[in-house]
Amino acid sequence: MNREATLSIDTGTVERLMPLLRFADRTRRALQYPLLGIAGLFALWYWGGWAIANNEDTMAFASFAPGPTLAAFWDIVSSGAVWSPIESSLYRVGWGLGYAIAIGVPLGVMIGYFLTLKQVTHVPFQFLRMISPLAWMPIAVLAFATWDAAIIFLIAIAAVWPITYATAHGVQRIDPMWLKVGNNLGANPYHTLRYIVMPAIAQDVFAGIRLAVGVAWIVLVPAEYLGVTSGLGYAINDARDTLEYDKLAAFVLVIGIIGYMLDAICVRLIKRSSYHAEG
Amino acid sequence: MSKGFLEIENLSQRFPQPDSNDLLTVFEGVDVTIDKGEFVCLIGHSGCGKSTILNVLAGLATPTDGNVIMDNKEIKGPSLDQGVIFQNHSLLPWLTARDNVMFAVRARWPNWSKAKRREHAERYLHMVGLDDAMDRKPSQLSGGMRQRVGIARAFAIEPKLLLMDEPFGALDALTRGVIQEELLKIWSETHQTVFMITHDVDEAILLADRVLLMTNGPHAQVAESVKIDIPRPRTRATLHQEEAYYPIRNHLVDFLVEGAKVMSAKAQEAAARGDNPRHTPRIVNPARPEAEPEHSSQPGPRMVRAV
């Protein structure tokens, strides 16, 4: 009797706890591998810091280690010093990407749509694409009145290619049947573009933008090493000049975190706009 | 001359050939009249121009000669008066089943509120038995379900003329049978005028009021208009018990096996002589041969068992 009673209480408790347990299990499954990866990166970083600190030649750079870096990170975040360079950098990246999208998407639609245009533009575009954006730096500085404009130009010229070619690829995958459906429903060219072409290529465009964000974020920092007195690239250069290596590493951390977040936004957009043509 | 709801007048289609200066005449001189609310099937061998005729009716193709008049207006381009169901469902893959139907409904009635569009779309999805699948995207639907969405979409815009180009060609036999009956059900509720291309003789007998038979190309003609004199409602299970079923079926199969070739040869001779190709299909009612005066002139040998 007694034993049975205990048993029934136990099952009742377990049943009440089930949703909680299930939630915990889901969370664990979703986080265990990413956390393992992060822990690995920290371990490597910690080991690197330890190695630098224990080598006589590199001892001066010991503040690159996680301890001093995280302290400096907390410092710039809590003092608010981190926000101004982030704002400047995002402003430049935002405009650069904006121009790249405004040019790249229509260009990609046309290249995808007109085979002739694709053949005409192939050589010049591949040629231009392979020139490092930073190689344009002297020209950009001459051509634009402000440093900001020059940097925006460099970001745009780096980001426009992945967007253009991803868009063109998306257009080429459009099933002629979808256009026929639109045609049959009496769609005019604007409707076709807005309700059939755009949703059909959205996932490819966002995939292109994701690549472009990566490129733009990489180009941004070296572009900000020169001329300007704001932004994350400038902040790193400035920290180096004043030998504040912990602050330098903290800004590297900031660049990585923001880059990750921008990428995560793109992944979100890709997921939301994605579909399978055939299941 | 009596004016029907849909008048196909002297329709011809000729295409340039790659290795000759002569035009290839796919079909010519086709005169067909279809009444409002009629369900008409078109049967013929591949290459006789069935799909071209359908595309002309849809306004998606322009004929070389002749014209099509629907409801006293010439068909000159695609419009919402003609709804089309294609063979491969043709749903927009980024929209759910409901949104695919609502998309078409919005094109038809741009001023409707969203709630009204939704209700209208759901009513037609319900008719094809998709109550539980409205929120799914095409990739999450089976082939048969996708074709059902296509049917719901085409019926939902309530076109004057519904065109179907082998709508069930890509489906397995079991699914095809189920959807044929659903199509019959939805048609009996709405009484759309339907023009459908099929390869399947039994499908035509089950669905149609009248079957148009086309001879082989080139110089194809719509040779016969066969009345399907079987009372409705029809079901697949009991269709073959109808007295009229086998005479009709034999007639259709005979035509496809033998008649289409013989008549095609005659049409080509006539074309070589330069005769006027304009023709109206001969009206045939295999279920009541005594009521048909030209019965003796039936072409070709009669084949009792043909597959």
Image: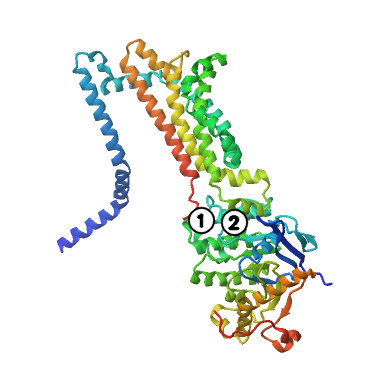
- Front residue (pair B197, B118): B197
- Which quarter of the figure has residue A201? top right
Determine which residue is flagged by label 1: B138
**What x and y, as percent, mark residue A173?**
53, 47
The chain holding disc 1 is: B
Residue drawn at (32%, 19%), measured in percent from left and top? A72
User: Within 10 angstroms of label 2, few (less than 14), some, or many (20 or more) residues?
Assistant: many
Q: Is residue B31 visible?
A: no
Q: Under tag 1, what secondary structure? A: helix
Q: Give the alpha-carbon distance from disc 2 to disc 1, as whole Å.
A: 12 Å
Question: Which is more foreground, mark 2 or mark 1?
Answer: 1
Residue B22 located left or right of residue A120: right
Quarter of the N terminus of chain A within the rendering: bottom left
**What x and y, as percent, mark residue A87?**
47, 22
Residue drawn at (68%, 54%), measured in percent from left and top? B108
Label 2 is placed on what type of residue?
Val
- Front residue (pair B99, A2): B99
| Residue that lies at the very extreme toward the front in this rendered image | B20
**Labels 2 and 1: the sequence-earlier one:** 2
**What x and y, as percent, mark residue B59?**
70, 57
- Asked if badges 2 and 1 are on one and the same chain, I answer yes
The chain holding disc 2 is: B
Determine whether A27 is above or below B165 in the image: above
Determine which residue is flagged by label 2: B101
- Front residue (pair B269, B207): B269
Residue A190 located left or right of residue A234: right
Q: Decide: marks 2, 1 in contact (CB < 8 A)?
A: no
Label 1 is placed on what type of residue?
Pro
Badge number at residue A144: none
Residue drawn at (61%, 77%), measured in percent from left and top? B205
